[in-house]
Image (spheres, coloured by chain):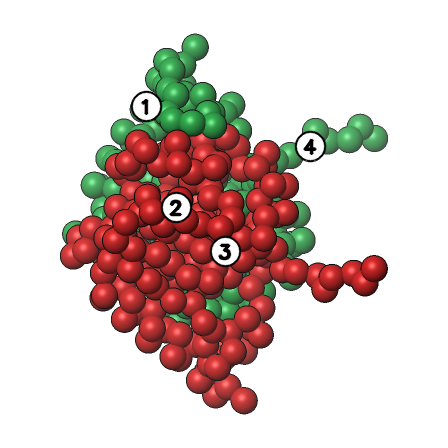
Chain colours: A green, B red
Amino acid sequence: MPRRPRRRGPDIEVLRLGHRPGRDPRLTTHLALAARALGARRLWLHPPDPSIRERLDAVRARWGGTFEVLPCEDWKARVRAFDGTTVHLTMYGRPLPAALPRLRRARRVLAVVGGAKVPPDLYGLAELNVAVGAQPHSEVAALAVLLHELHGPPRAREFPGARQVIRPSARGKKVEAAR
Amino acid sequence: MPRRPRRRGPDIEVLRLGHRPGRDPRLTTHLALAARALGARRLWLHPPDPSIRERLDAVRARWGGTFEVLPCEDWKARVRAFDGTTVHLTMYGRPLPAALPRLRRARRVLAVVGGAKVPPDLYGLAELNVAVGAQPHSEVAALAVLLHELHGPPRAREFPGARQVIRPSARGKKVEAAR
């Protein structure tokens, strides 16, 4: 039986709950940028916020890739309908290392992150409740660690269609037009 | 010759540049919480902002550990005076995996993170300019990945003196008084 080609971990989507349009655009922008840079395919945003989508559309036009921000009106329906493994990142969950084997085997992962107040139903709806350290934390940091563990270091070819690319440099900024 | 006891990676401090008091308290709070939760010893904040220090002091009183936020008036002096390896996290730098062996061997590491606008001098002053993906990013996410690689999963005993601790749980929130 032929071996399947080596996959780069599961296909990952992110669902961000408890976004507060107008109040925390920067924090959710950081979450979206981290999701994109570390290999997630898309971010569902609840409640929807066109300003975040526009910001990430501009990043994609310049820096490539296919990452998208999509509106999520009904987060419970989104979690229930997901065809894969749903993992809620929470300081109260089981330690990440114990969950990693299962997450790495999954074909698709939906990572759910909340803000300070998370709907209690989420703990029951998510298949896994996982902690990146049982301490008060940042959902941006917790998502980054999860994506890093599942996806590994991002590679330039994961961002096709860029207008410009960075030439990694020991000193200063080197940016060139994409070929 | 007796073997030295196994260390848990280098002693890590964080220097946050370009904080904007009043404008981005939440973002810098997230950065500080991530630094604490993922094993950094302290965060130097430039320019200083007592409100962030007070917030993290309250977290320490409740959740334990020795993490502290310290004011930094002169960031260049702080970088120059640091007795260890200084690493600037920037999307323009060399890939993190190439820098990890050196960082893991270091006794002390100062991780420097900026905001959107970083003083150009920093690229020359830092010993290493390192990228967690050559894409627009979040400094919270980049710091989280660095700390995760250097420190590994945080452990409860790294946070002595807590008033309460989390009992990791597959469902819901379980918090108990610390023994």
Disc ID at residue B79: 2
Q: Which residue is mark 3?
A: B12
Q: Which residue is mark 4?
A: A6
Distance (Cα) linking label 4 and label 1: 29 Å
Q: Which residue is mark 1?
A: A62
Amino acid bearing label 1: Arg
Amino acid bearing label 2: Val
Amino acid bearing label 3: Ile
Instruction: Tell me the SS state at disc 3.
Output: strand
Q: Is residue A111 left or right of residue A28?
A: right
Q: Which numbered disc, 3 or 1, marks the residue closer to the eye?
A: 3
**Which chain letter goes with mark 2?**
B
- Residue at 50% x, 30% y is B94
Pointer 2 and pointer 1 on the same chain: no
Amino acid bearing label 4: Arg
Quarter of the rendering containing residue A116: bottom left
Distance (Cα) linking label 2 and label 1: 33 Å
Pointer 4 and pointer 1 on the same chain: yes
Label 3 Cα crowd, 10 Å radius (few <14 / some 14-19 / many 20+):
many
The percent position of residue A162, horizontal first and vertical second, equals 39, 20
Instruction: Tell me the SS state at disc 4.
Output: loop
- Residue at 34% x, 64% y is B69
Pointer 3 and pointer 1 on the same chain: no
Q: Is residue A178 left or right of residue B46?
A: right
Q: Quadrant of the C terminus of chain A?
A: top left
**Which residue lies most toward the top here?**
A179
Q: Which numbered disc, 3 or 2, marks the residue closer to the eye?
A: 2
Distance (Cα) linking label 3 and label 1: 34 Å
